[in-house]
Image (cartoon, rainbow, N blue to C red):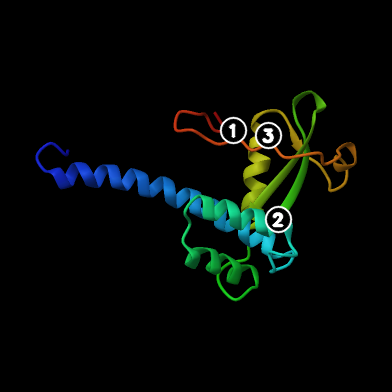
Amino acid sequence: MSGHSKWATTKRKKWAVDAKRSAIFTKLANLITIAAREGGDPAMNFKLRLAIDKAKSASMPKENIDRALRRAQGRQGSEIEEVIYEGYGPGGVAILILCLTDNHQRAISEIRAVFNRFGGSLAEAGSVSYLFEKKGQIIISQTENSKTVEQ
């Protein structure tokens, strides 16, 4: 409890803010890593330039941006890859899932579990993707009170 000390109150607030910043920085670093795999020069790689601009607007330290770029070049850390899974939801609805993962087996088992729980199934590669054309991107930010996919 933080009723007796000013530092205890400050510490609780600081930890909450730091946890949010850390989550944002992790997501931005993953975006930079994935974008940099298509080319490490921001002048030639539009996705990378957007990811770096987004990181800078979130006040991400330059050291963190450089670390993400090094990781994309394979000089550090685990390999994060962009993978597309295809499946059918309840009622035969076609679903494409774009996933950033460092472990394919873990990702596919979690996705399969969610599909099974809600009456869907994973499909073979190419069995759903022909139904879609990439037109844009929908970004959903998760709030503290929002429910997860499983809820």
Residue type beneath disc 3: Asn
Quadrant position of the N terminus in the picture? top left
Left or right: where does residue 102 sit relative to residue 67?
right
Residue 120 vertical placement versus 19 (above, below)? above
Left or right: where does residue 96 sit relative to residue 13?
right
Q: Earlier in the sequence, mark 3 or mark 1?
A: 3
Q: Residue at x 9, y 39 (%)?
A: 4
* x and y percentages locating residue 79 in the rendered image: 63, 65
Cβ atoms at labels 3 and 1 below 8 Å apart: no
Q: What residue is disc 1 on?
A: 149
Q: Residue at x 75, y 25 (%)?
A: 90
Residue type beneath disc 2: Lys
Q: What residue is disc 2 on?
A: 47
Q: Earlier in the sequence, mark 3 or mark 2?
A: 2
Left or right: where does residue 115 sit relative to residue 1?
right
Q: Residue at x 67, y 48 (%)?
A: 99
Judging from the image, what secondary structure is the residue with disc 2 in?
helix
Rendered image quadrant of residue 36: bottom right
Q: Nearer the viewer, mark 3 or mark 1?
A: 1
Cβ atoms at labels 3 and 2 below 8 Å apart: no
Residue type beneath disc 1: Val
Q: Residue at x 87, y 46 (%)?
A: 126
Left or right: where does residue 106 sit relative to residue 124?
left
Q: What residue is disc 3 on?
A: 116
In the image, 102 versus 49, the foreground residue is 49
Q: Earlier in the sequence, mark 1 or mark 2?
A: 2
Q: CA distance from mark 3 to mark 1?
A: 13 Å
Q: Please identify the residue farthest to the bottom as the structure is shown.
A: 75
Q: Please identify the residue farthest to the right as the structure is shown.
A: 130
